[in-house]
Every structure is written in C-alpha cells, then in structure tokens.
Image (cartoon, rainbow, N blue to C red):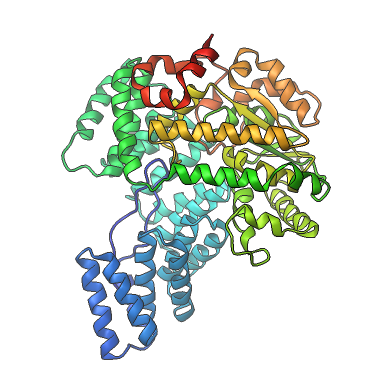
C-alpha cells in the first residue's frame, strides 16, 4: 500500500496526525487485501501510484476511481483513494471509501485508523471513537491511533479521556511531538497552564519546527520583557527561508500577539497582516454569497412564519443559547453562568447548525437551508427539539440549564426560537471595531473564513448587524443584549441580569467566574480565567492607522458617533 506523507498541520488547532503506519504495516494491508485485480486494473493502480508520487493528486484520484469502477476495489486501492480524497478535503467521499476498505479488510488496524481519523476531521467524533478503538483493539501498540482517539474524545468533550489517550500515544512512541502538543492542549483547556508549558517545551525539543507549540505557549500567558530573547529566536526562525505557509501563519499570529503584549502595535500589526494574508489565500470565501444567505434566512423566518408556528416547539427552558460575533464576550458570559451551581457550560455545540443544514433532506426538498424549514411539520419540529435535548442529556444529566455558546448560532436564531420558544437567548455585543480587530488578530482553531481580510470582516459584521436587527423585529421574545463594555464596567449588575434572564436565583459564585474549574475549549481559554479587566475596551485605537479598509466598510461616521 502506498505510504503517503507526514502529519497534517492545521494552523490554529492542535495538530492531527494523518493516517500513517510503518512500511511493514502497509505490507500487512497488501497481504490481507482482496485477491489481486486483473492486469489491466493493476496497470491503472500502478499509474495512480506513479501520479501520486509525482504530485498529481487529481490524476491519481481519477485513476483510482476508474480502476475501482471498472474492476472493483481491493483494500489497498480503496484505502489509497480514501487517503487522497481526505487530503483534498473531500471528507465524505473519503469516509465512504474507507468504509468499503474496512468491509473488505475488517481485521486491518490502519484501515480503521484512517476511517476514524477522517471521521474526526469531519466532526463525527463519536463514530470516530468507535473506529479508532477498533484499530487499537487490533493493534494495541499503535501510537497514531491512540493520538487520533485523543482528538476524537477531545471533540466529544471528554478531556480527561483524551489526555489518557495522548499519554498512551506517548508511551507507545516517546518521541511523538504532536501527542505532547495535544496533551498540553488538554491541560490548557482545564486551566492548568503551568503544567502544560513544560510539555510544550518538550514537544519543541522533539520537533523545533512545531510552530503550534510556540503559539500555545505565548498566547496562553502574558508576554513580558523577560521573553525578548526567545522572541528574537522565534523571529529568526520565522524569517528562515523555505518555511511553509502553515508555520508562517502560526508564527505570525504568535509574534503578533507577543508584540501586542509588549506594547508595540506597529510591529505586532505587521506580523498579523502577513499571517492573515497567507491564511486568506488558503481559503475560499465569497462575502456576496454570505450576504445572500443571510437575506434568504430573513426572508424565510419572517414574522408570519414564526407567528404561525409559535406553539410548535418544546417548552423546555433547559437550553441557554449565547450568541453574537466571535470575540464579543460569549465565553465570558458562559463562564459567569457556568459558575452558577445550577448551570452546566457545554461550550460551542455544533448541533443547531448541523440540524439546520440537514433540513433540506427532511422531506426530500431539493433546496439548501433555510428552504427546508418550510417542509417541517409540528411533529417534525418537536422531534428535532427532542433530539437536541437528548444531546444535552448526554453532556449533562442534572443541571437545570445547559449553555450552548456557539456565537454563529445568531444565524439560526429563528430556527432556535422555532424549536425552543421559551429558551433563554443572550446576545453579546461589543464595539464593532474592537470585535473585528480581535477576530483579525486571532488564529482560530476552526478558521472563520470572513476574518482574514479587513474589508471582508467589515462586510460580515454589517451583515450580522442587519440579521440581528431582523430578529429583533420579528421575534416575539427578543434576546437579552449584554454589552461587553457594560459587563466589564459593572460586572455584578450585568451578571445579575444574565442570571435572572435564565430564570435562576442569584448566586455569588458568578462573581468569581475566573476561579471556576471547568473545561474551556475556545480562543479565550486563558483570558476567561483572569478577573475582569478593561484593557480591551477601545483597544482598536492603538491600531487605528492600520485599519483603514475596516473603518471605511463599517462606516467612519457611525464609528465616530458611537465613540462620542
């Protein structure tokens, strides 16, 4: 079986190993594959392997597909095609071919590893756990499978289990730098920053080019003058010829944040701008399509649609939705609520968006969301609401309230109200320029496609505000609005408003939110564990000279008026 390249590096996220095994393991796959194809098929397979080795991945994929279609697939060919498709980002297709390979070779561990790793990349973490556990059952000393199982359990929110998986990967392969990196990430999510740093240093010792380790060290504490020498070494590494874009992006955001901490906005912005330029070049994004989508959502979820269906959903008050732009204070609000003894903070749950995206197939409607909402019956709405409540029960069985703080759920607020008309919704707002600048200077784990160009950032913010204005006009119960600036100015008053909106009695523990021990897996993992601070209010003024495209798009007159 063709042995493909090394580990996948994804800027802004814990490193995830690509399915890989030793040469002997791949020989093992070949020996257990289905009987060999005909010579003609064999020629197509050899051609596919040659094209892959030459770097023509599209040609290799085409040859594998042709051979499999004409002659049927062996475990080897299906596995190789699946891996190439996964590398190209065609995850669903890859998963299909991995499943076929697993059906032909159910006792081959690296096939289940490949399937599990790709399922995890696709967000199907529970299924990934099943496949990866099978790979480990077949080969207990399989470090890459332990590593990917850690990633999958981390995606399920089982941080302690994930940490044990990463420990197992390191035990099986002590020089596994990426496993050290992800183990440190689990500690940081639990607020154990002091314990994480030496593990990150060990990862760097094992692989000095592991730029994500530098990012996790320097973005999860305050950089001081004592770090100058390390920053000089890091800058020299950053300027080294031949460094790939993913590492340049990681290091650019790292050095930008460091120089921001040191009070040098001009130098910081230079790093941020280059990191964003490279990141934007790697992504497909169409701001016009986003505007059109938001307009379509507003057109479907209008006043009449929601009024006619006002009594369809579940009356449960258990879910609490915290929405807004990224970097607007959503993690802070959740941490305040999660400090209440009757609240469980579940973090950023993908279920609302995924359910909305699948509505098109509820009754076979050939249309993308939001058109599928038109096909829902009252029973269908309650079924979907029940599925969401069941998911919350899997996360926590006892809390009176469970928070879902995925900021982008603002897009689906009409759908949320359809499912849960009585649920508390909290809309976090922040100064528009501070919000956008904070997005621009953050290397998000899951890339926000609108966040890497100042003009596109402004356009997205304007679309967000228009959609929120629509929701305020058509929803019978508008969300509670919490201004970030008001929250940091008077923590207790705003915290009391938040708790009361959720139908709960006040608890003093909400004022000591930074001391609450819980897992936080967002970009604010370090900041949210600090007491309230006001240094981020009007921070954009320090960068004003560099923000022309953003200010023009947001509207300089509006910004000036808001600043008075």
- Left or right side of 296 for 11: left
- Left or right side of 529 for 27: left
296, above or below 74, in the image: above
Quarter that holds the C terminus: top right
Residue drawn at (75%, 55%) of the image:
381
Where residue 371 appears, as percent x and y from the top left, is 63, 55
Q: Single out the residue that lies furthest toward the top.
A: 564
Q: Where, by quadrant of the figure, is residue 244 drawn?
A: top left
Residue drawn at (33%, 37%) of the image:
250
Can residue 399 be spotted in the picture? yes
Where residue 292 appears, as percent x and y from the top left, is 53, 45
Q: Where, by quadrant of the figure, is residue 6 drawn?
A: bottom left
Where residue 322 appears, as percent x and y from the top left, is 65, 35
560, above or below 133, in the image: above
Front residue of this view, candidates 163 and 282: 282
Front residue of this view, candidates 39 and 422: 422
Q: Single out the residue that lies furthest toward the bottom.
A: 38
320, above or below 511, in the image: below
Tally of numbered tags: 0
Q: Single out the residue that lies furthest toward the left.
A: 241
Residue drawn at (67%, 63%) of the image:
362
Front residue of this view, candidates 276 and 459: 459
Front residue of this view, candidates 367 and 529: 367
Residue drawn at (25%, 30%) of the image:
234
Where residue 64 appears, as percent x and y from the top left, is 32, 76
């Amino acid at each position: 079986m063709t042995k493909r390249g090394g580990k996948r590096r994804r800027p802004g996220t814990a490193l995830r190993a690509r399915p890989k095994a030793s040469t002997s393991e791949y020989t093992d796959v070949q020996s257990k594959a289905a009987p060999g194809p005909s010579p003609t098929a064999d020629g197509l397979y050899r051609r596919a392997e040659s094209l892959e080795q030459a770097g023509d991945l599209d040609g290799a994929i085409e040859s594998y597909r042709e051979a499999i279609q004409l002659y049927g697939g062996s475990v080897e060919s299906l596995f190789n095609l699946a891996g190439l498709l996964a590398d190209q980002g065609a995850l669903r297709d890859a998963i299909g071919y991995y499943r076929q390979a697993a059906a032909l070779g159910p006792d081959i561990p690296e096939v289940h590893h490949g399937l599990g790793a790709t399922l995890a990349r696709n967000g199907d973490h529970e299924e990934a756990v099943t496949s990866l556990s099978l790979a480990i059952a077949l080969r207990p000393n399989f470090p890459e499978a332990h590593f990917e199982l850690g990633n999958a359990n981390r995606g399920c929110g089982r941080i302690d289990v994930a940490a044990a998986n990463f420990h197992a990967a390191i035990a099986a392969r002590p020089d596994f730098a990426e496993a050290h990196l992800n183990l440190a990430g689990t500690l940081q999510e639990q607020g154990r920053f002091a314990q994480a740093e030496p593990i990150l240093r060990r990862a760097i010792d094992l692989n000095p080019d592991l730029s994500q380790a530098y990012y996790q060290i320097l973005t999860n504490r305050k950089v001081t003058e004592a770090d100058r020498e390390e920053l000089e070494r890091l800058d020299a590494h950053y300027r080294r010829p031949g460094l790939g874009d993913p590492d340049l992006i990681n290091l650019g955001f790292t050095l930008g944040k460091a120089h921001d901490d040191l009070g040098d906005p001009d130098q910081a912005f230079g790093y941020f701008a280059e990191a964003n330029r490279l990141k934007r070049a790697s992504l497909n994004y169409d701001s016009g399509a986003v505007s059109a989508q938001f307009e379509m959502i507003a057109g479907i979820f209008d006043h009449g649609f929601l009024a006619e269906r006002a009594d369809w959903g579940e009356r449960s008050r258990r879910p609490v939705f915290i929405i807004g732009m990224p970097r607007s204070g959503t993690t802070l609000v959740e941490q305040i609520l999660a400090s209440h003894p009757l609240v469980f903070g579940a973090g950023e749950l993908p279920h609302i968006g995924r359910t909305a995206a699948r509505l098109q197939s509820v009754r076979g409607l050939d249309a993308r969301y939001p058109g599928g909402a038109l096909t829902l019956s009252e029973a269908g709405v309650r079924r979907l609401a029940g599925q969401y409540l069941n998911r919350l029960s899997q996360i926590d069985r006892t809390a009176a309230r469970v928070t879902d703080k995925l900021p982008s759920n603002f897009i689906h607020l009409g759908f949320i109200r359809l499912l849960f008309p009585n649920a508390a919704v909290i809309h976090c707002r922040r100064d528009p320029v501070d919000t956008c600048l904070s997005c621009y200077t953050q290397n998000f784990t899951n890339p926000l496609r609108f966040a890497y160009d100042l003009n596109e950032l402004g356009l997205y913010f304007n679309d967000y505000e228009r959609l929120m204005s629509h929701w305020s006009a058509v929803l019978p119960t508008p969300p509670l609005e919490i201004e970030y600036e008001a929250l940091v100015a008077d923590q207790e008053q705003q915290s009391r408003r938040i708790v009361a909106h959720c139908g709960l009695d006040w608890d003093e523990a909400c004022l000591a939110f930074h001391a609450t021990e819980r897992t936080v897996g967002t970009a604010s993992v370090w900041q949210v564990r600090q007491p309230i601070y006001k240094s981020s209010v009007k921070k954009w003024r320090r960068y004003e000279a560099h923000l022309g495209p953003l200010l023009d798009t947001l509207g300089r007159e509006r910004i000036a008026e808001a600043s008075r």
